[in-house]
Image (cartoon, rainbow, N blue to C red):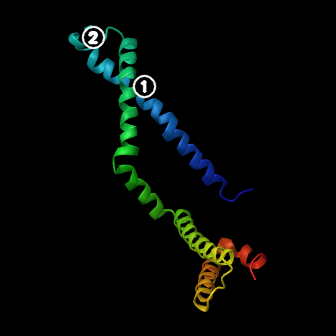
Amino acid sequence: MREDLLFRIWYYFRTGWGTYFAFIFAAVNTLVVTYYLAIDKLPVLKTIFPSFITYVLVSVAIAIPLLTAAGYIHFKKSTAYKAEVDISVESHPHMKRLLVSNEAIMILFLKMSDVIIKIGKNEKLDEKELKEIEEVQKDFMDYIKEQKDFKFISKNKIT
């Protein structure tokens, strides 16, 4: 059995509650409260929304496009989402390591492509290029040794 099973269940529960139940409950609550405490008490608004169903249909017809546009603006047009992602990456150790790993892999790929181009042109690597490749390899090995969950690699795959 997984040792983090309770935390996983707790996380799934919070996600279900916060994303689905609380959202639906809040929407229904807002509609009921605004209708019965505001619209139902004011004759002018009661003529516009003669029944609760009419109010719900009009509210939904207006709210869905309006809130969809707000969501679109949040993700595509404002800097709010970028700030959220920045904070998430800063505080999430797995995301940090993923970025570092990708950067290291890109450096390694660039060096490998240089070697392949040289080989393709029947050229030999000079001493400086060999030194650079060895340095990248050493840096990569040091990085792998620092990672606790990469121990299986250093034991089984890398000499």
Q: Give 3 or 122, whichever is nearer the viewer.
A: 122
The answer to whether residue 32 is seen in the rendering is no
Where residue 29 sits in the image (x, y, percent)?
Answer: 40, 27
Q: How many numbered circles does the render carry? A: 2
Q: Give 49 or 81, whichever is nearer the viewer.
A: 81
How many other residues sit within 10 Å of disc 1, few (<14), some (14-19) or many (≥20)?
Answer: few
* Quadrant of res 119: bottom right
| Residue at the spot of label 2 | 48
Where residue 4 sits in the image (x, y, percent)?
Answer: 65, 57
Residue type (three-letter) at the residue carrying disc 2? Ile
Where residue 63 sits in the image (x, y, percent)?
Answer: 37, 26
Where residue 52 sits in the image (x, y, percent)?
Answer: 37, 13
Placement of 135 over or under 74, stated as above or below = below
Residue type (three-letter) at the residue carrying disc 1? Val
Task: Look at 35% across and 15% down and name the residue there.
Answer: 55
Which residue in the rendered view is the most extreme toward the right?
156
Q: What is the CA distance from the residue labelled 2 to the residue labelled 1?
A: 20 Å
How many other residues sit within 10 Å of disc 2, few (<14), some (14-19) or many (≥20)?
Answer: few
* Quadrant of res 153: bottom right
Q: Earlier in the sequence, mark 2 or mark 1?
A: 1
Task: Look at 57% across and 43% down and name the residue there.
Answer: 13
Q: Give 99 or 133, whichever is nearer the viewer.
A: 133
Q: Give 115 or 81, whichever is nearer the viewer.
A: 115
The answer to whether residue 157 is seen in the rendering is yes
Placement of 58 over or under 71, stated as above or below = above
Task: Look at 40% across and 39% down and name the residue there.
Answer: 72
Under tag 1, what secondary structure? helix
Q: Quadrant of the C terminus?
A: bottom right
Placement of 25 over or under 134, stated as above or below = above
| Residue at the spot of label 1 | 28
